Image (cartoon, rainbow, N blue to C red):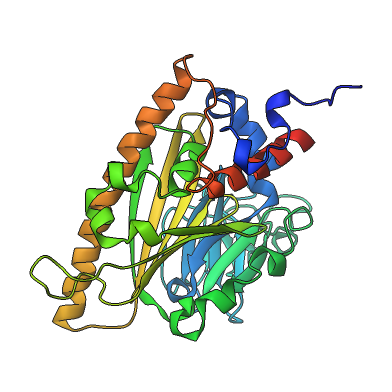
């Protein structure tokens, strides 16, 4: 029988006998370019929430695995996502998020674009033969706004059909948890010394919660913890143990915790009154940045502000626990000691789902 033209460790694996992805996919420097070309440029990536883009000129800068982009609300009300790279000599159009800009001006040489990405002026270029600013435009990405979240795709033809990408999620979220209703945006970022896939692996299972997250373990009902997978996403669900030690209401009150992961690097952490989004951004084979954006139900009361502050503090506690173990795992993967271990079929089915998506991409690549 003719052998397949891909390594044995990329062959599909059934969940009940699956092993984790081999270490080389986390430590080989060549994976950076492969992941950019075969995964990120062919996927829907989260850029912003509509609460950040309410008025014309409001804009958000995002890193899509090495491609800087800018999401802008145009004068016509449309949200566009464009390359944040000047067509002159590659300077940044914007270096940070902003509000109500009248135009987009590259800070390197002052080339200025409209909110729709058309070059409007270029200092001292009037004498350049054949130079027509109206013919110079910032490349645009495909954009879809879903549940108030702005997604963009570099290569829309190669990305999944967006309706298939989120199929079933609206019904699960329901009207009570519509994500578009949140505001009070706040961002926290962490630089983590691990491959982006290590961080995603860790996110996708609650198996480690009793061992790594004592505070979170008290909040969730681990015995009732459920993980399910769909074609392009997975979700973890747990009822909240909402009473504190004094018998009062806990941080989030009644309800449940719902954690969505969307291929390849987006997480939606939904708790009563709060949406937290995570974007895992590759920065090298053994480095990534995780950006946490917090959105809350409208509440400007003192109690509302206190809950937001408590939520931010608790989240920081959990993230520091996660990034510490992720950096330990990266060192283990790079040590030369590791051979892929068996996955837990009950608790690591979403890890298996992610690895099978990766194996398919790598086989095709």
| Numbered circles on residues, count | 0
Residue drawn at (41%, 56%) of the image: 96
Residue at the left extreme, as displayed: 246
Residue sitting nearer the eye, 261 or 180 = 261
- Whether residue 306 appears in this view of the structure is yes
On the image, the x and y values in percent for residue 305 come to 19, 75
Q: Is residue 277 left or right of residue 222?
A: right
Q: Is residue 260 above or below residue 176?
A: above
On the image, the x and y values in percent for residue 19 come to 58, 32
Q: Is residue 294 above or below residue 197?
A: below
Residue sitting nearer the eye, 79 or 85 = 79
Residue drawn at (15%, 67%) of the image: 244
Residue drawn at (61%, 68%) of the image: 80
On the image, the x and y values in percent for residue 53 come to 48, 73
Residue drawn at (47%, 23%) of the image: 333
Q: For the N terminus, which image quadrant?
A: top right
Quadrant position of residue 273: bottom left
Residue at the right extreme, as displayed: 1
Residue at the top extreme, as displayed: 336
- Whether residue 54 appears in this view of the structure is no
Q: Is residue 251 left or right of residue 168?
A: left
Q: Is residue 330 left or right of residue 89?
A: left
On the image, the x and y values in percent for residue 294 come to 35, 65
Residue sitting nearer the eye, 215 or 70 = 215
Quadrant position of residue 307: bottom left
Q: For the C terminus, which image quadrant?
A: top right
Q: Is residue 364 above or below residue 115?
A: above
């Amino acid at each position: 029988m003719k052998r397949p033209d891909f390594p044995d460790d990329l062959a599909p694996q059934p969940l009940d006998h699956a092993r984790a992805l081999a270490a080389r996919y986390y430590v080989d420097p060549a994976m950076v370019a492969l992941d950019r070309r075969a995964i990120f440029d062919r996927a829907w990536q989260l850029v912003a929430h509509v609460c950040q883009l309410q008025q014309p000129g409001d804009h958000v800068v995002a890193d899509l695995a090495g491609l800087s982009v800018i999401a802008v609300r145009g004068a016509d009300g449309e949200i566009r996502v464009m390359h944040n790279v000047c067509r002159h000599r590659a300077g940044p159009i914007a270096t940070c998020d902003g509000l109500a800009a009248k135009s987009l001006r590259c800070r390197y040489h002052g080339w200025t674009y409209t909110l729709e990405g058309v070059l409007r002026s270029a200092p001292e270029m009037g004498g350049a033969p054949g130079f027509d600013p109206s013919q110079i435009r910032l490349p645009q990405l495909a954009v879809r706004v879903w549940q108030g979240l702005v997604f963009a795709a570099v290569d829309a033809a190669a990305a999944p059909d967006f309706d298939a990408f989120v199929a079933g999620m609206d019904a699960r979220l329901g009207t009570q948890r519509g994500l578009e209703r949140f505001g009070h945006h706040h961002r926290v970022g962490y630089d983590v010394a691990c491959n982006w896939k290590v961080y995603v692996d860790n996110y996708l299972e609650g198996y480690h919660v009793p061992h790594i997250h004592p505070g979170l373990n008290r909040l969730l009902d681990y015995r009732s913890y459920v993980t399910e997978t769909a074609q392009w996403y997975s979700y973890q669900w747990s009822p909240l143990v909402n009473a504190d030690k004094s018998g009062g209401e806990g941080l989030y009150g009644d309800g449940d915790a719902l954690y969505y992961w969307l291929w390849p690097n987006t997480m939606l952490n939904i708790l009563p009154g709060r949406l937290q989004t995570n974007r895992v951004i590759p920065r090298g084979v053994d480095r990534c940045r995780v950006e946490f954006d917090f959105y809350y139900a409208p509440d400007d009361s003192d109690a509302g502000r206190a809950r937001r502050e408590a939520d931010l503090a608790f989240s920081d506690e959990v993230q520091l626990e996660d990034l510490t173990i992720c950096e330990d795992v990266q060192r283990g993967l790079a040590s030369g000691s590791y051979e892929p271990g068996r996955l837990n079929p009950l608790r690591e089915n979403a890890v298996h789902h992610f690895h099978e998506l990766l194996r398919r991409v790598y086989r095709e690549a």
